[in-house]
């Protein structure tokens, strides 16, 4: 039976990390909310009086009777089933640890344009967004990308992957992070990226993987836009 | 061999979720950074040229050869070993999902006093903190606590626990969340808490568990303070 992915239908957002894993795994899945009445179906599952394990927020994945939420948790589950994480317990926890660290910078990237409240428009928190973004570009992006650069450098199986000798969901997620940061902050990233050559090379390699390349060229890949987590506001990019 | 916990020695912070699990499990552990030269030892592991799996940030746990970071990841590991999570894979993922949701509100609680940058003092971002906290109290605390209230209500094994019929690390973490919010925002929480009676009752029950009660009364429990994640600034509490 095909997996069912539940996520907002018009943005990449956190759901994109799951989409990339499903695409790389080459498994069948339905992006439920992009179908007619799909958002209502998603909402029903969240409010769902019946659900024993209600999700707090999308994305969530249904695999038969199993309903799993939290992006990193979903990837932990999928990675194990489809060879996108190491086989050993230690390896799986290490991959998960990296994914949770990627989740942390994704949260921070969101808060660059929404430092006060998700319930307010960007325009209602623009001065604060400018301040927060300046710090994000100056301190946070280099700290995180520097960390992933070190992880690649120290991988005993080679700097081609974050974990082990094969593509894991962590590699796919690091690709998505770099793609998102580059969309949001092209000016800043043009300056920063040369300092993290292994990260940049990994991004480029993932984009060329046959299934990922096919996905990126398909209508299934939603374009970056101004409703997602990574948004391009030139005034924020220039804040650095 | 005793576990080694690495976390900042003067705050509860994210390390406290791990401390509570270790205490409830009744296992031996060393809170490394609270020993002489312990912070330097922690720093060495983070910078550690030798470490194959370097942590991005504390807390991290050493169990022999295994080094694990990210709070929820550590709890996933410990829960399985010490009966603080369900036995089935589905149950473990559900517990982990709840823990990741608790981690999300903990991040948001931190950002109430640091909405712009961790690298700046609170006093340098006080107007922004006031705005962010007002939204946190009005919208976010009720949304999260309402969610955990529903989870308790729907637990087929009874509302005494978030997961299954026994105390899990999720229960300990929800206790800590409520304790932290109550320390930081006593005025707001006095108004909010009656709306979430199952959450409040769970908090009170966890505090009375013999090992937890002993821990809370010991010198091992660091008091809440103005350097941690949960901070009491009366002007923020009144912002609601």
Image (cartoon, coloured by chain):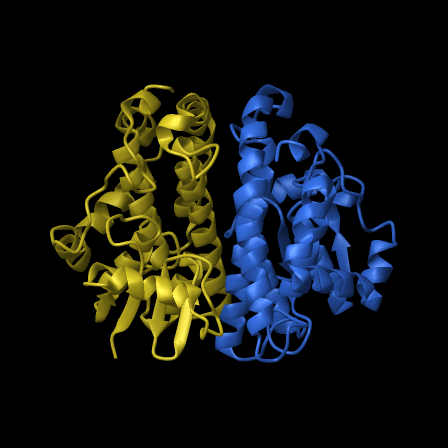
Chain colours: A yellow, B blue
Image quadrant holding the N terminus of chain B, namely bottom right
In-image side of B22 versus A2 (left or right): right
Q: Residue at x 30, y 42 (%)?
A: A228
Image quadrant holding the C terminus of chain B, namely top right
- Indicate the quadrant where residue B11 lies: top right
In-image side of A34 versus B90 (left or right): left
Residue B15 position within the rendered picture, expressed as x and y whole percent measured from the top left:
67, 50
Residue B225 position within the rendered picture, expressed as x and y whole percent measured from the top left:
76, 37
Identify which residue, A12 or A216, lies in the foreground.
A12
Look at the picture and state if B207 lies above or below B45. below
Identify which residue, A202 or B154, lies in the foreground.
B154
Identify which residue, A21 or B111, lies in the foreground.
B111
Q: Can residue A209 be seen in the rendering of this structure?
A: yes
Look at the picture and state if B221 lies above or below B73. above
- Indicate the quadrant where residue B57 lies: top right
- Indicate the quadrant where residue B217 lies: bottom right
Residue B144 position within the rendered picture, expressed as x and y whole percent measured from the top left:
55, 53
Q: Can residue A167 be seen in the rendering of this structure?
A: no
Q: Residue at x 79, y 61 (%)?
A: B207
In-image side of A79 versus B230 (left or right): left
Q: Residue at x 27, y 57 (%)?
A: A20
Q: Residue at x 32, y 24 (%)?
A: A237
């Amino acid at each position: 039976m095909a997996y069912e992915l539940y996520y907002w239908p018009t943005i990449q957002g956190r759901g994109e990390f799951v989409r990339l894993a499903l695409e790389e795994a080459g498994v069948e899945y339905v992006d439920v909310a992009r179908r007619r009445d799909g958002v209502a179906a998603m909402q029903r599952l969240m409010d769902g009086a019946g659900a024993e394990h209600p999700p707090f927020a999308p994305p969530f994945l249904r695999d038969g009777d199993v309903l799993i939420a939290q992006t990193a948790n979903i990837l932990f589950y999928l990675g194990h089933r489809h060879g996108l994480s190491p086989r050993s317990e230690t390896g799986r926890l290490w991959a998960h640890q990296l994914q949770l660290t990627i989740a942390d910078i994704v949260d921070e990237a969101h808060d660059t344009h929404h430092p006060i409240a998700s319930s307010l428009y960007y325009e209602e928190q623009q001065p604060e967004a400018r301040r927060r973004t300046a710090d994000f570009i100056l301190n946070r992006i280099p700290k995180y990308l520097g960390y992933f650069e070190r992880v690649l450098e120290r991988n005993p199986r080679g700097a081609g992957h974050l974990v082990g000798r094969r593509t894991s969901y962590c590699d796919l997620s690091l690709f998505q992070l770099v793609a998102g940061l580059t969309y949001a902050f092209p000016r800043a990233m043009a300056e920063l990226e040369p300092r993290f050559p292994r990260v940049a090379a990994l991004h480029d390699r993932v984009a060329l993987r046959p299934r990922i390349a096919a996905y990126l060229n398909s209508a299934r890949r939603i374009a970056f836009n101004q409703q997602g987590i990574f948004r391009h506001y030139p005034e924020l990019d220039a804040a650095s």
